[in-house]
Image (cartoon, rainbow, N blue to C red):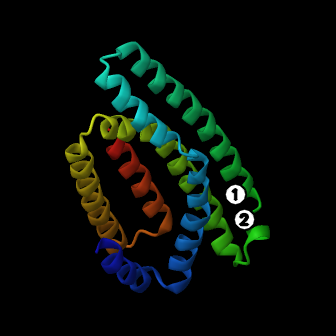
Amino acid sequence: VVAFLLSPYLVHSLGDQAYGLWVLVLSVTGYMGLLDTGLRVAIVKHTAEYNARNDAAALNRTLFTGLTLYGSLSVVVMVLAVAASFMFERIFSVSAGEAQVGRVLVLIAGLNVAMSLPLGILGGLLAGLQRFDILNQVTVIVLLVRTALIVAAVGSGYQLIALGWIHIAAQVLTGV
């Protein structure tokens, strides 16, 4: 529902070109999330298993291993984001003004994905502990807060870079 209502508002407020740039950057950087490769599912499975056995040591090893792997993948994501930022106007056919904003947006969106990977361990832990109530509450609250911030920022005249930082803040809020 939020996406259904927010998208037309953003198109109208930002304009076709700016909104198109926003969607382009989020779509491209969203593919970096594929580096997860099922690790979160493994964390959920092993959390449930080790919790049922009351094996805190194995649970800690699983979470530490996940954090290590996600941390490494986050470095890869940032390297890819920096590379894409430098080559943005060569990869995409955009105007010079859009290229400058696009380069910054790729870095911000890459940082968002890089942060989401290790922070995803917390969601995997909660899912493994079968605390879907907490996961769903956090998801809904962060979605509503992020949407309100986006509407307020765009309504106040802020543009795409502000939207990127709002997404970063929402990622941090989700982790907290």
Q: Is residue 159 above or below residue 42?
A: below
The three-letter amino acid code for the residue at tag 2 is Phe
Residue shown at 64% from the left, 73% from the top: 98
The three-letter amino acid code for the residue at tag 1 is Ser
Residue shown at 62% from the left, 39% from the top: 73
Quadrant assignment for the C terminus? top left
Question: Looking at the picture, how far across and down is residue 88, in whole percent?
Answer: 72, 65
Residue shown at 56% from the left, 45% from the top: 36
Residue where numbered disc 2 is placed:
88
* Residue 85 badge: 1
Residue that extends furthest to the right in the rendered view of this protein: 90
Cβ atoms at labels 1 and 2 below 8 Å apart = yes
Residue shown at 40% from the left, 13% from the top: 57
SS at badge 1? helix
Foreground residue among 89 and 57: 57
SS at badge 2? helix
Quadrant assignment for the N terminus? bottom left
